[in-house]
Image (spheres, grey):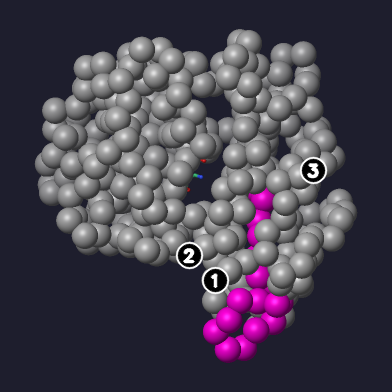
Amino acid sequence: MKCQQGGTFSKGELKRYGNIELSPCAGVLNYGQGLFEGLKAYRKQDGNILLFRPEENAERMKAGAERMSMASPSTEQFLQAVKDTVLANKRWIPPAGKGSLYIRPLLIGSGAVLGVAPAPEYTFLVYVSPVGNYFKEGLAPIHLIVENDLHRATPGGTGGVKTIGNYAAVLKAQSAAKLKGYSDALYLDCVHKKYLEEVSSCNIFVVKGNTISTPAIKGTILPGITRKSIIDLARSQGFQVEERLVSVDELVDADEVFCTGTAVVVSPVGSVTHLGKRISYGNGVGAVTRQLHASLTRLQMGLIADEMNWTLEL
Ligand code: PMP
């Protein structure tokens, strides 16, 4: 669906997957006006489809569009486009317990613009793909390396919204980490260079006793929907959850570390390497990580009653 700057989006239509045409002067190609979302559809054992908190994705896209001077679809238009695309691709949703359908809503500045300015026209589209585990490890520990030189976000920048440029910024560190055999890079804040921010595509949590700490949302990390859900689930299960500055030094004494995200779900961290030293978190998956992973995935797959009212059944 399309929209002129300052206007509202037209009604959308379903199209076969294929290339889209863009002017070489499109805002997204020249000035980075691109935002995306990521969510998953799960098939329940009874065959029905579940979406997890899709209205949160709609709201996050709207907030991102505001930061990027872009037009954005209304929550209703976003949800309708997601539902229509998922239902049209129902046959691609893996059987219950065998994976999910990853849904990618994408908003771009498609109008032509030569001088630096917001594009005059925007395009919103949704595409989908069946997926399995994000990390090849599955629910097995991943290994991170702290990135000391490159940063993915600056205060006042766009690190807190899901804009395409943030992902371009992590590719170098992420590729270097993978070449060295790590699963991904862990970024620090760019001012003090000592507070944890996040991983290339997920948020991070540190467990010490009954306390679970995670970096506070201050504009330089993405406000993850999985992060928010895990905070609520952990609190409801009696853990103390702290959203605050978490120093990289706290990794040394942590009992467990885990990452959260739509793609990675809840991924246990087996080790973090910082300044050449490897900090390990025991063998296998920690008890807290395992418990939170189970609570979240059972809810997302419809295996337990959704007392949080987070799922939308199609
Ligand atoms: N941080 C970044 C940089 C991400 O790309 C993602 C994935 N969207 C997350 C965190 C986790 O967000 P969510 O739980 O909403 O998927």
- Separation of marks 1 and 3 at Cα, in angstroms: 26 Å
117 magenta-colored: yes
* Rendered location of residue 64, percent (x, y): 55, 57
Judge whether residue 137 can be spotted in this image: no
User: Circle 3 is placed at which residue position?
Assistant: 80
Which picture quadrant has residue 223?
top left
User: Circle 1 is placed at which residue position?
Assistant: 32
The label on residue 131 is none
* Rendered location of residue 218, percent (x, y): 35, 50
- Separation of marks 3 and 2 at Cα, in angstroms: 27 Å
Which picture quadrant has residue 156?
bottom left
Are discs 1 and 2 less than 8 Å apart at CB?
Answer: yes
Q: For this view, does 93 lie left or right of residue 284? A: right
User: Circle 2 is placed at which residue position?
Assistant: 165
- Residue type at mark 1 is Gly
Is 56 situated above or below 282?
A: below
Q: Nearer the viewer, residue 274 or 116?
A: 116
